Image (cartoon, helix red, strand yellow):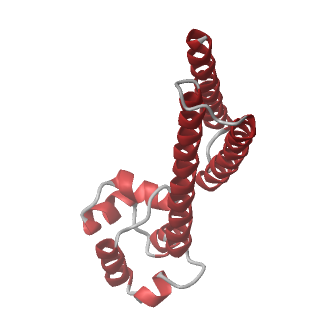
């Protein structure tokens, strides 16, 4: 929407930035969808281009869509953090079985299955986040690599603790 308004009113990014009291980089970020204007800037844009806030914030507008996307990303991040915390609890259960709390094998198997399911769910959430954030393949591979390394590290630590106990 900012691009269209700038073109219609023949305003450069620098001029628009000066009138809105922001940097030209901020304007560029709004145009590319990396960030969205806050309410104060939306009011200034509305006043500057003589367009109602209703039209700026109409359902389906870039601003509204970006706000919805960011809200979904934040929710998905919270869910993925929950899976990590749950995996840590599962690992604690497994480790506690090696330090005196003898658990039945069925509990240990269920815990291992829980870890596997949790990791799958975490990958789903991370994949959704990547899609919504429009990350490059290189960024995606880097994050997947880090996640896999952390999973392997947790497994190795569990095995080492188990090995040193016996």
Give above or below for 160 relative to 51: above
Q: Picture coordinates of residue 48 (x, y %)?
A: 33, 79
Near-viewer residue (78 or 114): 114
Residue at the spot 56% in from the left edge and 28% down from the top edge: 95
Near-viewer residue (132 or 87): 87
Place residue 52 in its image quadrant: bottom left
Answer yes or no: is residue 32 visible.
no
Q: Quadrant of the C terminus?
A: top right
Q: Picture coordinates of residue 92 (x, y %)?
A: 53, 35
Give above or below for 46 relative to 38: below
- Indicate left or right for 106 with 95 as reference: right
Give above or below for 75 relative to 152: below
Place residue 160 in its image quadrant: top right
Residue at the spot 57% in from the left edge and 83% down from the top edge: 59
Place residue 79 in its image quadrant: bottom right
Residue at the spot 64% in from the left edge and 40% down from the top edge: 136
Give above or below for 72 relative to 97: below
Q: How many labels does the image show?
A: 0
- Indicate left or right for 141 with 59 as reference: right
Residue at the spot 52% in from the left edge and 24% down from the top edge: 99
Answer yes or no: is residue 80 visible.
yes
Q: Picture coordinates of residue 64 (x, y %)?
A: 52, 75
């Amino acid at each position: 929407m900012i691009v269209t308004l700038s073109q219609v009113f023949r305003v450069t990014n620098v001029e628009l930035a000066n009138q809105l009291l922001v940097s030209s980089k901020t304007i560029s970020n709004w145009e590319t969808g990396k960030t969205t204007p806050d309410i104060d800037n939306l009011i200034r844009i509305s006043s500057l281009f003589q367009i109602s806030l209703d039209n700026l914030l109409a359902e389906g507008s870039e601003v509204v869509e970006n706000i919805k996307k960011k809200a979904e990303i934040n929710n998905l991040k919270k869910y993925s953090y929950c899976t990590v915390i749950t995996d840590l609890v599962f690992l604690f259960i497994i480790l506690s079985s090696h330090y005196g709390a003898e658990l039945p094998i069925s509990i240990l198997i269920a815990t291992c299955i829980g870890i596997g399911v949790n990791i799958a769910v975490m990958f789903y959430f991370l994949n959704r986040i990547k899609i919504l954030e429009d990350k490059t393949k290189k960024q995606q591979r880097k994050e997947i690599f880090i996640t896999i390394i952390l999973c392997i590290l947790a497994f190795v630590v569990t095995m080492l603790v188990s090995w040193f106990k016996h």
